[in-house]
Amino acid sequence: MSELFDFSFLHRPHHERSHHDHPGSDPRRHHDPQPAGGNNTGGKGSREIQVARRVLDANEEMARRNRQIFSDHGIFVLNMMSSPGSGKTTTLEKTLVRLMPEIRTAVIVGDICTTHDADRLAGSGAPVVQVNTDAFGGDCHLSAQMIEKAAAGIHLNSLDLLIVENIGNLVCPAEFDIGEDARVVVLSVTEGEDKPAKYPLMFRECDAALLNKIDLLPYLDYDRQAAVDFIHQVHPGMPVFEISAKTEEGLDAWIEWLTAAIRRKRSG
Amino acid sequence: MHEMGIAMQIAEIAVASIPEELQHSRVKRVNLKVGKLSAVVTDSLRFCFEVVTRETPLEGAVLAVEEIPVTARCKDCRHEWTIDSPVFSCSRCSSGAVELLSGRELDIESIEIAEEDG
C-alpha cells in the first residue's frame, strides 16, 4: 500500500501544514474548526469538533479554478463519459473530423494505462494529452487536479473547445467535477437497456446522452425505446442522440447540439 | 471504486481539524454524511479508512456513516418526496422539472476526540 499511496501528510502535525501541500484543501480557509457547544455527544471523555466540510472540496475548489481559467480563454469544456467499450473514442474521432479546423479543439484522454486512445485521436490533428491514472493507484476517474496538470501542456490561447475523454466507467467520473461546461454520456446498444437505472447518478449529472452502435440494431434484441425511456426516467427531458459512430448515422444532430452549446458560451 | 481516494481525503481533513491543543489526542470517531446518490460503497470506505489511518492520530477511530435519503422537490407543483427508485419525475404530477434537495452529500460533519484524564 505505502508504495502506491503517500500517506505522509497524515503523520505531520497540523501547524506544519501549509497551503502549498494541497492547494485549496486547507480547512482553515473556509471553516475554522470550533469546539461544539455541547461538547460531549461522543460519550464520556470525548470532545466533538465540528468540521462541516465536503470531503471532495479540494477537488471542487480546483474545478472552480479550472472553470475560471477555461472561461477566461473562451474555451468550452466537454466532459465525455461512458462505460468501457461503448465506442467513446470512435465517436470522438468522428466528432473531431466534423469540428476541425473551424472549431479549434484539443483533447485530454484519460486511461488507467496505455496510450492507444491518444494514438488514435492524434490522427485528427487535434492536440492530444494523455493522462494515465495508474500513478495514482489506477484511479477510476479524472480529477480536477489531473485536468489542471494536463491543460498546462495545451496552448489555451488558440483553442475553442477542450474535450475530456474520461475513464470508461459509469460510476466514479460522475462524482468528480473537473471544471467542465457540459457532460455527455455515451452508451451503446450492446449494453443493457436499463443501464441508466443502474447508474442513475451518471445519467442525472449529464446534459446529453449518445446511444451508439445503432448500426447493430438489426442483429440484436435491443429495445431502443426502452433505453430512451430509462434515460428519461432518470433524467426527464435530457437530449438523446441515437448514433452510429461507425456509419456516422445520426452524428449531424449531435454535432449541431454541441456547436450550439459552444456558441451559447461564446456569446456569454 | 474510488473509496481509497475518498478515505484519504477524509483522513486528511480529519487530521487537519484536530485543534492545536489536542494534537496528541486520539480521534475516537469521525461522523460522515453520505447521500444515497453518492458513488461510494460504505463498507469499502470503512475498510479503506482503517488502512489509511494506521499509525496516525485516527487509528482505531470509528467511521460513523449517516446515510442521507434522496429527496426532491417538483418545480411545477412544489411537491416534496423521497426518491427510492431511479425515477426522477414528480410522484404527484409527473413533471420532470425536479430539483434534488438531498442525496448527494459526502460531508464530514464532525470528529470526536478522546480527552485526557484530568
Image (tube, coloured by chain):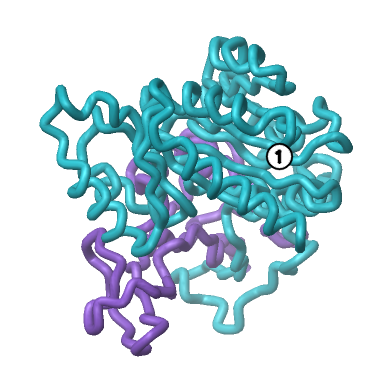
> In this rendering, is residue A220 above or below A82?
above
Q: Is mark 1 on a helix, strand or loop?
A: strand
Q: Could you say where residue A158 lies in the image, as x and y percent from the top left?
A: 86, 34
> In this rendering, is residue A243 above or below B63?
above
Q: In which quarter of the image is residue A125?
A: top right
Colour assigned to chain A in the rendering is: cyan
Q: Could you say where residue B51 lies in the image, as x and y percent from the top left?
A: 48, 33
Toward the left, the furthest residue is A221
Q: Identify the chain drawn in purple.
A: B
> In this rendering, is residue B18 above or below A122?
below
Q: How many labels does the image show?
A: 1
> In this rendering, is residue B59 above or below B38?
above
Q: Mark 1 lies on which chain?
A: A
Between A224 and A81, the residue placed more toward the observer is A224
Name which residue type carries label 1: Leu
Q: Could you say where residue A23 lies in the image, as x and y percent from the top left?
A: 79, 46
Q: Could you say where residue A43 lies in the image, as x and y percent from the top left?
A: 44, 70
Residue B54 visible in rendering:
no
Residue for point 34% across, 89% down: B77
Residue for point 39% across, 74% down: B98
Q: Quadrant of residue B44?
A: top left
